[in-house]
Every structure is written in C-alpha cells, then in structure tokens.
Image (cartoon, rainbow, N blue to C red):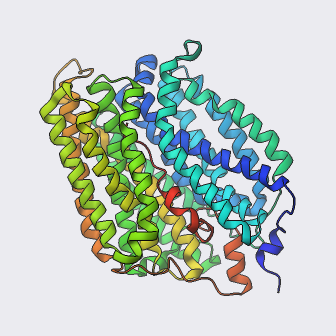
Amino acid sequence: MSSARETAAEPVADARRWMALAVLLTATLLDLLDATIINIAIPSIQRDLDASYTSIQWIAAGYTLAFAVGLVTGGRLGDIFGRKKVFLLAMAGFTLASALSGLATGPDMLIISRVLQGGMAAMMVPQVLSIIHVTFAPQESGKVFGMFGAVCGIGAVSGPVIGALLTEWNLFGLEWRPIFLVNLPIGIAGLILGHRFVRESKAPSAPRLDLAGVTLVTLALFMLLFPLTRGRDLGWPTWCLASMAGSIVLFVLFVLHQRTKVRKDASPLLELSLFRIRSFAAGIVVQLTFGTSFGLFSLTGALYMQVGLGWTPLRAALTSLLFGATMAGVAMVAVPKLVPRFGRKVLQAGALLMIVGLGLYGWIAHQQGTEVTPAQIAVPLIVGGCGLGMIMAPLTSAVLSEVPGRHAGSASGLINTINQVGLSLGLGLTSVAFFTVVDDAGKPAPTGGAPFITAFTHSLWWVIGGMALAFLLMFALPKAAQAQFAPPAEDGAEDTAAASGAASADDEPALRSEAAPAANAATPSVG
C-alpha cells in the first residue's frame, strides 16, 4: 500500500529542495518577527499617529487574534487547493499588508493592515511544515527540523532588537515604518524564489472547510475582546457587558455546531473528544491562562520601559533580551534533560520561578521608581526567563502525553491556537489591569513617569495571579514524562492524517515534535 506521503508527493532528490527550504524558513521568520517586533515600536507609533492607548492595544492584538482564528482554515485551504498555491498567495497578501502597515496614515488603517497581515500569516505559516513534509525524505527530517527550530528561536529573540534598531535608525525619516517596509523586498524575493523552487502538493483526502465554525468562533472572540478593550474609554456602557455575555452564548453555539459536524461529516473545526482526556482538558486551560498572563506582561512591560522610564527602544530591547535569551537557553535543556526525569514538576517549578521573578521585578520597580537601571532588573528578568523556559516547550509535550496518535495533529494545533487566543486576551486585559490605573492618576492623561510605573506594578499582580492559577492547574497534568503521543498505525487513514497538513492548526504536530522547543518559545517580547 502506498503511503500518503507518496501519494502527496515524492521527496525531491536534487538541490532545489534546499532553496525551497530557504524560502519556507524565511516565511516563518517573517511571521515571528512581525509578531514580536511591534511592542518595541509602540511609543513611536503612538506619537507619530496620535494613537490612543486603545488603538495601541488593537495594533498589537489584531495580528495575534487574526492569526489565531485563521490557523485551522489556513491549513485546510492548502490541503484542498494546493499548498504552494496558498503559500504564495498568502505571502503576497502578507507583503501587501506589510506595505499598508508601513504606509498607514492613521491608527485605524494600521489596525486593519495588522489584522490583514495576521490573517495572511495564518494562511502562510501552516503550509511551511506541510511542504517540508512532502519535500524531504524521512532521513533528512532531523537536519531540516533542527534548522526550523533554530529559525524559530532566532525570530523570537531577535525581533525586539531588530525593531529597536530600525526605529532608532529612523531610516529616511520614516521612524517606525521600516519595521514593516523591510518585509517588502524579502516578500518579493520569496515570491519569485517560491514560484520557482517550491513544489505543489495537496492532501489525498483533505477535511472540508468549516466556515460556519470559523465565523462563530471569530464573532465570539470579537464580542469578548472589543468591549474588553474599548469599555474603559467609554465608561463601561451596558452594551459592552451585553456583548461579553453574548460571546459566551456564541461559544456555546460553536460547541453545539461542532457536535453536529462530527455526526454529519466528521470534519469539525475542533475535535471535542479530546476534552474527555483529563490531562488535555486541564492542559488547554493552563495554556489559555499562561498565554493570557504572558500577553498582558508583554505589552505592559514595553510600556513600562519606554513610556514609564523613558528608555530608548534599543535600551529596552537589549534589557528584555535577558528574558528572551534565558528562556530560549533553558527551553533547550528542559525538554531533553529535565522533563524525562522530573515530569510535571519541571512546569510547576517554572511557574514558581516566574512568580518569584515577577514579584522581585515589581518590588524593584516600586522601590526605584524612574531611577531603575537595567542592571537592577537583570536578576528578575533572568529568573523569570528561566521559569518561562521550563514552561513553554515542556507544556505542549505534557498536554499531548495522553492524546491518541490519530488525534495528535488536532490536539497540537488546538494548543497553538489557544496560546494565540490567550495572548490576544492578555493584550485586551491591558485596558483593565494597566490603563485603568493610569487613568486614576488624573486628567489630562499622564504621558509617562510614575503613573505608568504604578500601573505596571499593579498589572504584575494580575500576571502573578495567572501564573499561580496555572501552577495549580498543572496538578492535573501527568506526573511523569511519557511519549508525546503514540505513533500512528500503519494504515491509509493514519498516513493520510499525518501527511495532509502537518502545519495546519489541526494536523501539525507529528512533524513539529522535533522542533517544538524552539517553535513554542516564539512568543512576544516583554520589551
């Protein structure tokens, strides 16, 4: 019997496949940079576009939210219509959205452009691992995924520094705009090379699109996040509270719709049977809690350093690099060395370290006020980075540990999506946990200094509370390390599932397991 890999495409036996890999890794790097680069340029964007703090939240959250809700659909579009075709179309859209972002004349245009950019990334990124899967032979996977993981790590750590340099250099007097415009030559080159070197492939039996499910979950998230972000400015009118309550109704309707899809054509957007697995259900809640806490920390940390302390973008980026670099280094040790020996205790120790690091960070920020130096907050950033590294990469393996092999793709894709949704929620909570405190400082609204430092230390209590909740929820995870998931059986259905979209939000993980540590570490920077 021919395997699905053979049905989809035979691995290419010449050097052209390495040029294709370069294009695919470049696309991955573009997504990671644009997800992490924005925070460092926020003060410059705010001054130049006269943007409100609400607009700033949406500029940051728009990309993440669009990326989250589009992942599943993006992966399935490639399976159905051709991965190369969708990849090139999405890269073209991403490049156009980057141009629109860099040429934005106001905050509204920038928000819309960022949402478009995130949506295009959601179509582009899932094709990367799918194309790699059908392009390279199994014996090459270790080398290929090592390169993929390295690119993920580089993107996560270097984004803020690159953003700071581009902003401070003020190329051609464009201030922050080059952080987006730099994507244009890269995107155009990627389109030309991708058209020449990337091979076309489709899934032998791709699941159907669930557009109704995507619509329901998108509306539910919007009805939750929009009033959460805007409510403070508007004085929390009744419609804000009604919208958030209505989002719960839509989430319930989404679950009911998914049950109907299972009975009707077995192609749901969300595999509900996974939630019968205790470790998975608890792990998803941990992922959501963790993502929300980190999303809140990432934006408030940037505002604290650059607006509260008045630091330059480069100074803030280099200081926060301690956090990201420590996280990346510890993550590379945690999965192969610590988790097999200590199991879930590694994650719980990471949560406790983050609580200690964040508590120390808040104490120093409160004591030193505007006089704090990078050296003084280096220790809490390193401690927090160690904790983050002990959580980010091991969490996916822990959540997947009891998931059957046939559902490994759906489960891992859901984890990635929930993480992005959590980041969006955290960015939305900034309005409540941070800007409400700034508002209390009086009118006119403060533009920096002590009120922003007070707001940051206040928001840290929210983050610490989230990490404490995550610590408690981790008790529901398996005690000991297990295989991430059982290898699928050698049959046509399982082969098809494995090959039909490794990087789509519901088919990704069987391929991603080797690159998981670095890939899952790709999160927004604190500064």
- Identify which residue is drawn at 75% across, 73% down: 205
Horizontal side of residue 262 vs 346, given as left or right: right
**Residue 372 point in image, percent of width and height:** 21, 29
- From the viewer's perspective, is residue 114 above or below residue 130? above
| x and y, in percent, of residue 5 in the image | 77, 73
Which part of the image, by quadrant, shows the N terminus? bottom right
At 50% across and 65% down in the image, what residue appears? 414
Q: Give the camera-side residue of 99 and 144.
A: 144
Residue under the point 55% across and 29% down: 179
Residue 73 quadrant: bottom right
Placement of 382 over or under 315, stated as above or below: below
Where residue 415 appears, as percent x and y from the top left, is: 47, 64
Residue at the location (37% across, 77% down)?
341
Quadrant for the C terminus in the image: top left
Farthest left residue in view: 367
Q: Is residue 132 left or right of residue 471?
A: right
